[in-house]
Amino acid sequence: MGKTTRFVTALVCSAALTFTVAGSSLSTANAQSRTDVPTIGTAGGAFMSIERERLFGDHYMREVRRVAPIVEDPVLKEYLNTVGNRLVRHADNVQYPFNFFWVNDSSINAFAFLGGNVGMHTGLILEADDESEMAAVLAHEIAHVTQRHIARNMERLQAAAPITLAQMLGGILLTVINPQLGMAVLSTGVAGAQQRAINYTRQFELEADRVGMATLARAGYDPEGAPRFFTKLQARYRYATQVPQFLITHPLPESRIADTRSRAQALGPRQLEPSLDFELAKARIRVRYGTRNARDLLVSFNNEMRDGQHPTKRLASRYGKALALFELEQFDEAKEIIAELIAVEPFNLFFLDTKTDIMLGQKREAEAVEWLTREYMRRPNNQVVTLNFVYAAIAANETQLARRIINDYVIHNKNDVVAYRLMIDLHQKTGDGPALHEAQAELHALRGSFQLGVDELHSAFAKTNESDESNRQRIQARIFQLRALEAERNRVFDI
């Protein structure tokens, strides 16, 4: 079997395992009590160190970027990471920074894997009625990571059957793309250990419930968000022949929901006002990443604004209307709505991003740069402000300004795909061949395509003037680094 074939086979054979551990079966056995919950202690530490877990997580995230439909939207990314990191700040046993990302998929699903990587399908937020419901799912996934359920389950599986590490870890990729196939492959890939894995997963889910709901409450969310969301899904799909993937990997028996309900009561329910950013995120996903056309959505948002909504939801419907108008290139009407919204919420990043799009759509590039210069001076470290600023500067042919800002940004944000796409646009516009190849190399590296990255760096080296020795040495050093990363990846996946 060739190296590439072996790698793909390893990914397929373990497809559902990581998902099943990290985001799976929210069922709990009736007989289990809180005293049965395993504690974190040093469990899993002998099998996989924290550093090795981070290493695996980094390489698997690169592969996910390569094959999954990740939403590279700075505003939505900022929102999800804000909610996720709010939970992380109130979680115990956090060993490293977390990375939260969206997958553009209308199904209801969420998952976590090694290294603190947590993915959420766009379909899940559309199903949630409030931010506490969405945060409850994130808190559960965070608990799987902090409690090291993946390493602990791998340890037990390896003791039960001769399964390679690559087989046990490759699953996140296929699960993101085709969860049903991943679950089917799991049945054959880990046959002897399957039942033992499922039994232990029930223990993990009980622990993730206890830890996740405590985190949810400490972060200031309504702990009722968990049983409320789960009850709604159970009722909606009770008699359905096709259920969402979330219910396949997260079964919801009555005992499971009853347990979360009693925990929520013990933690103390909270009456919270609707979150504006949550509602804005839903509106943005409906327009930018949904399946309905802009004209239909425009009608929907107009109807929602007439239905006596809560003021926060009415603002979000107006924002959705502005987005739909922008998609229809009705820039003047969209501009009026965004101006009204900014008057109410002057520092809201959703509004800032859409105002930038409208100004560039109206060919007001210089005005956009002037306005975003002020916003950048106010919030120089914010990714949404910075990336919009660079985007506007490129459109306005302020290439030196754009280069200075984006080069500084990537020093501290080395994994930002949008930043490298903007660098590629910038260097194509200026005709800077070496810099263009370097930006393309970094984008390939973020997706785990290290050889393609090396090829781009060789092109950059060939186009760099021989007298520019410092840059040639820097490019050569980066070639060595990518080759080292590729060798490390091959060891991780046993290629």
Image (tube, grey):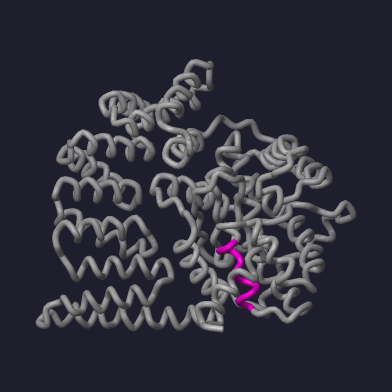
Residue 18 highlighted magenta (yes or no): no
Query: Foreground: 467 or 240?
Result: 240
Helix, strand or loop: magenta stretch? helix
In depth, the one of 246 and 152 nearer the eye is: 246
Say if residue 319 shows up in the picture.
Answer: no
Q: Residue furthest front?
A: 1
Does the stretch in magenta take in 171?
A: yes
Q: Which residues are magenta?
A: 165-174
Q: How many marks?
A: 0
Q: Is residue 391 visible?
A: yes
Q: Position of residue 262 (x, y in %)?
A: 79, 41
Point out residue 467 in the picture as x, y percentages from the top left corner: 9, 82
The residue lying at 53 percent from left, 48 percent from top is 105
Horizontal relation, residue 485 to residue 231: left or right: left
The quadrant the N terminus occupies is bottom right
Q: Is residue 488 above or below residue 27?
A: below
Say left or right for 264 vs 121. right
Decide: is 272 above or below 452.
above
- Residue drawn at point x = 38 percent, y = 70 percent: 445
> Percent position (x, y) of residue 432?
15, 65
Left or right of 205 on screen, residue 309: left
> Residue 459's image quarter?
bottom left
Residue 70 against residue 273 in the figure, above or below: below
